[in-house]
Image (cartoon, rainbow, N blue to C red):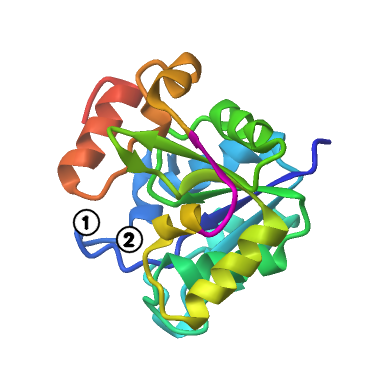
Amino acid sequence: MNDFGAAILAGGRSARMGMPKAALPFGATTVLERILDQLRPSFDEIVLALAPEANELFSVERAIANRADLIVVRDAQPWAGPVPALARAFAAANSRIIFACSCDLPLLDACVAAALCAMVAAHDAAIPEIAGQLQPLHAAYRREPAAAALSAMAAAGEARLRTIAERIGARRVGEAELRALDPELRSFIDIDTAADYARALRLAFGHA
């Protein structure tokens, strides 16, 4: 295919939502299953990063059923944040370019994800920037330099994933370029709160 892989982080606490975001119903499926279904046709491999089994907040059995090609890794410590989780996911991956995302993007568009992977080109990453804010968990990375940077960040106790843009040769993808792919930027809508979830349901299905 295209030597693009994907890494989905699904080991967070979902504290603001009050329930596991990955397991929220979304139509006939769940948010996590929808993301997996979106990415699977366009990506050579998918790595799913989860919390330790003892700290699992939701059952992943339905999401990973009949997905023999899915690589599952687990955090060494619960709730340690995205930096060590992504470092572990990248270490388990084999693809040259990895699209990294969180598990709370129910309107994720695989075409946008693949376009970001293509934008990496001669860079180490293609990281969207919306309203002045980097989106490192809806971004594409060259696996080897990113994995090295993430490992160094984790070892140094750096928890801010956005600082990876300062450690590798990252291309910042501006909002105008992103809107050419996704006019309403739906792919970037996350669901941190119940209001966010209701909005995503309205956009997808016309109701909350």
Please tell me the numbered disc located at residue 116. none
| Residue, disc 1 | 17
Residue 133 visible at all: yes
> Contact (CB < 8 A) between labels 2 and 1?
yes
Left or right, 5 with respect to 200, comes to: right
Above or below: residue 116 compared with residue 176: below
Q: Quadrant of residue 12?
A: bottom left
Between 60 and 191, the one lying in front of the other is 191
Query: What residue sits right under mark 2 in the picture?
Result: 20
Say if 77 sits above or below 84 in the image.
below
The residue carrying pointer 2 sits among few (fewer than 14), some (14 to 19) or many (20 or more) residues within 10 Å by Cα, namely: many
Secondary element under disc 1, as helix, strand or loop, is: loop
Q: Amino acid at mark 1?
A: Met
Q: Does 75 appear above or below 171? A: below
Q: Quadrant of the N terminus?
A: top right
Residue at far right of view: 1
Residue kind at label 2, given as amino acid type? Pro
Crowding near the residue tagged with mark 1, few <14, some 14–19, many ≥20 C-alpha atoms within 10 Å:
some
Residue 84 is situated, as x and y percent measured from the top left of the image, at 50, 73
**Residue 117 picture location, percent across and down:** 64, 37
- Image coords of residue 156 (percent x, y): 46, 81
Name the element at disc 2.
Answer: loop
Q: Which residues are magenta?
A: 167-172
Q: Quadrant of residue 11?
A: bottom left
